[in-house]
Amino acid sequence: MKVARVLSVLLLSLLSNAVVSQNDTMYVVQDGTITGKHAVSSYDSIVFYDPISIKFNDSILTDASGNTYTSVKIGTQEWMAENLRATKYSDGTVIPNAPGKAEWYNLSTGAWCNYNNSSSNDATYGKLYNWYAVETGKLCPTGWHVPTDAEWTILTDYLTANGHNGTEGTALKFTSGWNSGGNGTNYYGWNGLSGGNRSSGGTFGSVGPTGHWWSSSQGSAGYAWLRNLYYYSESVFRGYDYKKSGFSVRCLNDDASSTIPGEDSLYLVKGDSVLFVYATTDIDSITFYRPNSTITSTTYSSKVRKWRNFL
């Protein structure tokens, strides 16, 4: 609130020393200078666009088993916002279900199971897959793939550089479902849940304390890289585990260009046309001025995440 008051005083001072339009006008201000002036009658609406996190339309992703998913954009990447539930590879081949301990341990080909072998866990947590299923390159829907170790690092580096240094895991974790004190903010809508796991020997780890997601990168002959979240930590942990282990899977869009690029922006819109664009980093505040009335000031917040019509 203190910043907003200072900006308002600054704007009053600026406008008192400027040639003020006699029409209803919007002024854009940065560092004490009016950088833009637009007649209110020239546009229909003002749109604040925040590219950090865009929730795409429900059910835009469909796997070969007919399951549908939502996705979310974080930085330059578009991630599936739910754990994978596929029972078929993208080419339609059935992925075997391996509920038994010995069966699970003896496999060196792709397989899945539900946590605790209970189908009731599927909708919430998705399935657990061994890395052999990941290795096929056909586990995700067409146009999507299991992220590499490097692509996971791109995600965590983005979180670190954009307000979540040391709390990257908290930003990804869901707001419930974790052991006491371990819930996250789900800042980007990534919906990170503690979905359990299965050891290479077939024993299930419990839901609540940890969440694990495969990468498609091999660590050594018997191991592969993954990312881990823990209820007791705010960080994201890089690790490796046996390929026979069962972990959750998230998919990443193959085409980075399909995500919406850019930075936080303010758009002036008339009908279906964008008349003018400002990067919000170039704006301290916007002021709406009405002649023969009072000056009102609105300070833009970079956390605005939806369309807003002011007129």
Image (spheres, rainbow, N blue to C red):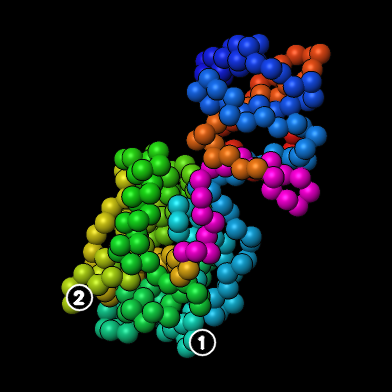
* 112 w.r.t. 156: above or below: below
For the record, the magenta segment spans: 256-275
Left or right of 175 on screen, residue 98: left
The one of 12 and 297 positioned closer to us in this rendering:
12
- Where disc 1 sits, the SS reads loop
Res. 137 image quadrant? bottom left
Query: Which residue shows up at 38% across the image and 54% down it?
Result: 155
- Where disc 2 sits, the SS reads loop
The N terminus, quarter of image: top right
The one of 303 and 36 positioned closer to us in this rendering:
36
Residue 184, horizontal then vertical, whole percent: 44, 43
Residue 286, horizontal then vertical, whole percent: 63, 27
The residue carrying mark 1 is: 92
Left or right of 197 on screen, residue 222: left
Residue 23, horizontal then vertical, whole percent: 80, 24
* Sequence-wise first label, 2 or 1: 1
Residue 18, horizontal then vertical, whole percent: 65, 16
Q: Amino acid at mark 1?
A: Gly
* 34 w.r.t. 93: above or below: above
The residue carrying mark 2 is: 222
Query: Which residue shows up at 62% across the image and 66% down it?
Result: 59
Q: Amino acid at mark 2?
A: Gly
Mark 2–mark 1 distance (CA, rounded to whole Å): 27 Å
